Structure formats: structure tokens, C-alpha cells
Image (cartoon, rainbow, N blue to C red):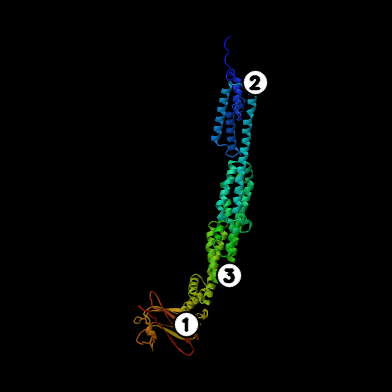
Amino acid sequence: MPPVPPMPSSPPPAPPDPLRAAAVGLLNLSGLGLGYVLLRRWFLAAACWAATAVLLLVALPADPDGVPAGALAGYIVVLLLAAAHGAFTALRTRLTWPSRAPLALALGVLLLAVPTAGTLWYRDAREEAVQQALLDRLHRADETVTAAGRHSFITSRSDYRDALDVYRDLAVHHAGSRAAGQVPDSLRAYYRTVGAPYASGDYCGAIEPLKYLRTVPQSLPENRLGSLAQWPDDRLATSLYACGATALSGDGEGWVEHFGDLLGTFPDSGPAAKVAPAVESAVARAQKDVGGKAPCTAVERLRELNTRALTLSNSAGGSAAQLTASAGRAKRSGDAGAYDCGIDQYKDGQFSAAQKTMEDYAARAKGAKRDRARKIAIGAEVAQTVPAAGKKLPTTASGGGISVTVKNDSPDDITVLYTGPVTGSFTLKGCGNCRAYSFADTIRIGFKPCDDSGKNYPRRTISLPVGTTYFVHKPNGTSTATPASDTAKIRSGYIYTECAYTTRTFGN
């Protein structure tokens, strides 16, 4: 009896079946490792499950940036290797279930819908994540604007710019997003927040924010802004006028700048038309104030208005003629008001200031006031040396019934100033053989200038009325001699001689 062949340790390999190999490969491409399950390769199936689990951990929840490229590439490589290896293994290995390769192939084709559906779902989830991220950016920008509105514009300017950068990026580079659709509402809130000082009536504080808002169209196309592009214009024009008018009425300096900006930027606006009348009103008020309690302040104001109105007229366009006319009125009124200012200074004992004011006025003016201004200037100069002389304002009276002869006992040409019932001045040539006295000479007992009958003193005789007349004798030219003074009480029935002399200071 022939020997019995031994039993094989494992079933013989199945005949090669390309259809079965294709079915296992497709099943492994699903990412679920089902091809290995049908081949009972549990370790390899678990490896596929692990790879899919890692991908899900990395990909979920969906991120706007998507799955990292390295992780996705690695997973695809794993799927391709699993499909190739599974197909190669199944070529000679029977399936546990289903036993027929066509059914397994149909199942593999059907299960390819899993990664396809997953990809489509993830794309939608990622798109939603992108939308949410853009909405979060918009929300943070809105919160930045709200917080910035609680502080001054200067402090918050950079925050406003940052928020505007976000709005611009959303509107321009993410135009189809839900966040971009909400940008118009955010921009309206943005304009209201930045321009809040105007709404609260702080017109001076509104100028810089409104100027800033006029630059926004440089960052965002006007078709994205709509009516907001012109939103600041009327408000800025109103603010420039209101702030300038406040400064003008309060004697501030900023009105020229604000009115200049208004006339240059919005020359045809309603507020611009109010500028020239406002300046004219300021001139009229200052003219009226010349007759008030502070004429010098009014004169200074008129001169300031003259200068600044002329400056403003250079950029005023259609208002230039009106402003130039107002400037001219201010100058004429200021020049005329100097007379009242000089009188006020004299009455207040500001004799040096009164002298200069009246001398300047007399140099420009004509008529009777000029003559009195000269008298007051003389009286003010005398009062600087003899304060008692400034108790009464000089008049234009002249002459009198009493002769007073003034001699010059000084080597210098001198000017004799006098004030009292009448006021005037004249000059005397220097005495050729006379000298300036020292202080010690003037306090010596028996000191009598003009007492040398052998000298031919330059002299002049004037007529004065009864009363007290104050004299000051001051050297002319570059002499450093100190002016001398005298107080003469003139009475009728006498002939008076007044001696003019000068004293020298120590070291001279």
C-alpha cells in the first residue's frame, strides 16, 4: 500500500484573483482598514485605524488654516501603502466575507464615499471656521473702537488706525465673508465714535478727529464707504467756524488758523460765509471798547485784529475784500484810540507809557487832538521826574500874564519842559563857559546856579499864568548828565527867573 502524504499545515494559496485584489485595495483606501479586516490581518487593520484616528485628532475641530500639510501628506501615503499592500496580499488570499470578489469590490467602491463625504464635510467646517475667525476679528476691532472712544482722540489715534486696518482687510480681501457684510455697520459706529466730540458740542475737540475721518477714504475705497465718505465735511466746517468764533470772541489766537482752514478747505460752505462778518463784529466790539474802562486793551485788540485779518485775507478767496476792509477799520480805530489810551495811562500814573503813546499818536494824527497829545506827552515826561506834576492832565491852554525867564547854566544844549496851568517845551543852547554841577555842589549851602553876572547865559522868556508850574531841564544829544527839576509857584506882581542846569553822576 503506497504511503499516505502528510496533511498541509495551512490551506493552499488561492488562485490569483485581480478582482479580489482590487476590492481589498479599494476597501483600504476608505481609511477604515476594512480590506485587512476581510483578510484577517488585524494588526494592519489596527494600524489603519490608528492613522485615521491621528488624522482626526489633528484635523478636528476644523481650523481656518486647515489640516497641516505634513499630516495630510503622511496620511495619504499611509492610505496608498495600505491599498497597495492590501491588493498585493489579496491577490492570493481568500476573503472571509464576502466570499465573492465582485461583492467586495462593490462594497469598496461604496465605502469610498466615506473619505469623499468626510472631505466635503471638513471643507464646509473649515469654511465655517474661517467665517467665525473673520467675525471674531471684526468683533475685536469693534471692541477696540468702543474702548478707544472712552479716551481722548490723541491717546486713541493708533487704536483707531488698527481697527480701520481690520475693516479694510475684511472689506477688500474677504469681500464675500459674513464679516465683510457687517463692515458697513461697524464703519458707521466707527465714524460716530471718532466724531463723538462734535455730537457733544465740543467743537474745538472735534476738529482733529474729523480731519482724521476725512483721510479714511485713502484707506478704504469710497464705494465701500458710501455716504460716510462725506460724513465729516459739514461737521468739520461747522467745528472750524465755531471754534474759531469762540477764540475770536475770547481774544484767543487760534481763530486765524481755524478760519484759514475753513476758508481754504470749504470755501463755499455756509460756515465759511460767516467768517468775514464775525471778524467785522469783533472789530466793532473793540471800537466800542475804546471808550470803555480799558481803552489800551481795546487799542491793542484792534491792532491785533488788523494784523490777523490781513493775514487771513491772503487765503480767504471771495471773503478777502471784506476781511481787508475790516483790517483797515481796525487799524484806523486803533490809531485813533491811542489818544484815549494815552489819557488812561496818564491818569493811572503810567507816565512813561503815556509819553510814548502820545508821542506816537501825535506823529501820525492831525487836528486839535494832536496838539493836546503833544502837551500830554510833555506833562508825562515831566511827571516821570516830578510825580506831583502828573496830578492833572495838561490842557491846550497857552500864555499868561507873568514873565518867566529861563537861563541855561549848563555846558549842554538842553530842552526845558514845563507843565501846570500851561504846558510846553523849548530848547536852549549850551553855555560855553559853564559846567555840569556835582551832587555835592547842589547840596552846598548857598548853592545858586545862574549866579555869575559875568557869564552870558543863553535864555528865553515865556509867559505863564498864576499857579504852580513844574520844570524839568534835560540835556540833549549823548550827554549823560542827569536832568534837573524845579517847582515854581507863580504869583502876580512878580518877575521870575528860572535857572536850568544839569548835574553829573559819579564817575562822569
Residue corresponding to mark 2: 100
Task: Identify the element where label 1 is drawn.
Answer: strand
Amino acid found under the numbered disc labelled 2: Arg
Task: Identify the element where label 3 is drawn.
Answer: helix
* Rendered image quadrant of residue 332: bottom right
Circles 2 and 3: CB atoms closer than 8 Å: no
Q: Nearer the viewer, residue 90 or 506?
A: 90
Above/below status of 500 relative to 20:
below
Picture coordinates of residue 383 (x, y %)? Answer: 48, 79
Picture coordinates of residue 29 (x, y %)? Answer: 59, 28
Q: Residues within 10 Å of mark 3 (few under 14, many from 20)?
A: some
Residue extending furthest bottom?
493
Q: Nearer the viewer, mark 2 or mark 3?
A: 2
Amino acid found under the numbered disc labelled 3: Asp
Residue extending furthest front?
1
- Residue drawn at the location 55% of the way across and 68% of the way down: 333
